[in-house]
Image: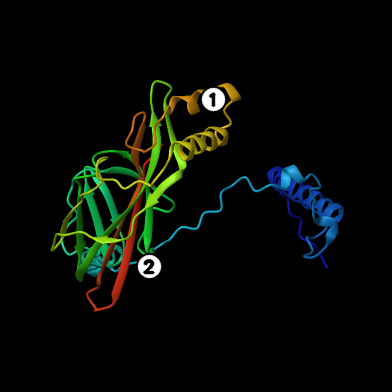
Amino acid sequence: MKFMNFRFPKCVWLLCFTIICFSCNNSNKAINHGAIVLGDSTTIVTERDPKKLLDLVTDLKPDIPPAVKPDTVSNTQVAVKDTIKKTAITVTPVSPAATPVPNVPGLKAEFKEVMIIIPNLNAKLAGKPNLIGANGAVYTWLNGPIDGAIVRTRTKGTISKVSQRYQSVVGIKNKIGTLPLESLTVTTNWEAIKGGPNSFPVKGLDPESLQYPKTSNAAIKNAVLRAATQRRMNHKKVQEWVNSVGNARTPTQKPLTVMLRSVMWKIDGKDENGKVFSKQIRVDIPM
């Protein structure tokens, strides 16, 4: 058999040589590293430094709405606005008052069944500001008139009676200062306030009308001694207060005076469902 002689160009021989060399290099790399095997612990890099394992990226939880078809975009937007308006009406708490709260400075106590407003009487509420589930509230007087004030009520039900009581205390007022005598106090009984239907004027809290206990000169000096000692005054100061009383036998003699210590109001009525309620507020006057 005769073989035919073929002459290959030099470029063909060079191309073949390049392909053979490239194949050898890939074969060596495969032998050195091998294939990646799932679960092979030798191929896992484990970081042991805890500082480098901290998550420095905030975990976001976006609320992504579902995709909307182009032909329903306008209708969907209207529906969302309507939903927002309805939700706002449902969530916003409705005041128990039948009429809006007057925008005037003063004390405002908003209970579930009734709102109590005393215009121009400024006081600081003690405790939680939400009185919806409470039956009473305590305030500390800041400024504004108490005697002559008007207790106003706002309710969807009816108010049957508004009552008042107070506590008075005998005190000393002179050039040394003011010293309330805690052991000489009077707490009155509840008395109904004339007025209505939603307005009740406060009376009988001026200094001349306040009740006071029966006393004697010895009882007054003993009360002064006790009050000064409770305030941890030194012996010289205590004796100065005792001597300032002089021969006074009643709280109406100078330097003694009768002061309002606290006043309480009680509002009785029925809510819009006919259920009876009773709410109280107290205003303490700092001494």
Depth-wise, is mark 1 or mark 2 nearer the camera?
Answer: 1
State the residue at coordinates (30%, 61%): 190
Residue type pointed to by label 2: Pro
User: x and y percent of residue 147 in the render?
Assistant: 22, 44
User: x and y percent of residue 263 in the render?
Assistant: 32, 50
Q: Secondary structure at mark 2?
A: loop
Count of numbered circles on the image = 2
Q: Nearer the viewer, residue 264 or 35?
A: 264
To which quarter of the image does residue 36 belong? bottom right
To which quarter of the image does residue 106 belong? top left
The image shows residue 69, relative to residue 218, as above or below, that is below
Q: Which residue is mark 2?
A: 66
The image shows residue 286, relative to residue 138, as above or below, that is above
Q: Quadrant of the N terminus?
A: bottom right
Q: Is residue 193 left or right of residue 226?
A: left
User: x and y percent of residue 114 in the render?
Assistant: 26, 64
Display coloring: rainbow
State the residue at coordinates (31%, 68%): 278
Earlier in the chain: of badge 1 and badge 2, it is 2
Give the distance between the C-alpha atoms of the residues marked 1 and 2, in whole angstroms: 84 Å
Q: Secondary structure at mark 1?
A: helix
Residue type pointed to by label 1: Gln
Numbered circle sitting on residue 264: none
Q: Which residue is mark 1?
A: 239
State the residue at coordinates (22%, 75%): 272
Q: Nearer the viewer, residue 253 or 89?
A: 253
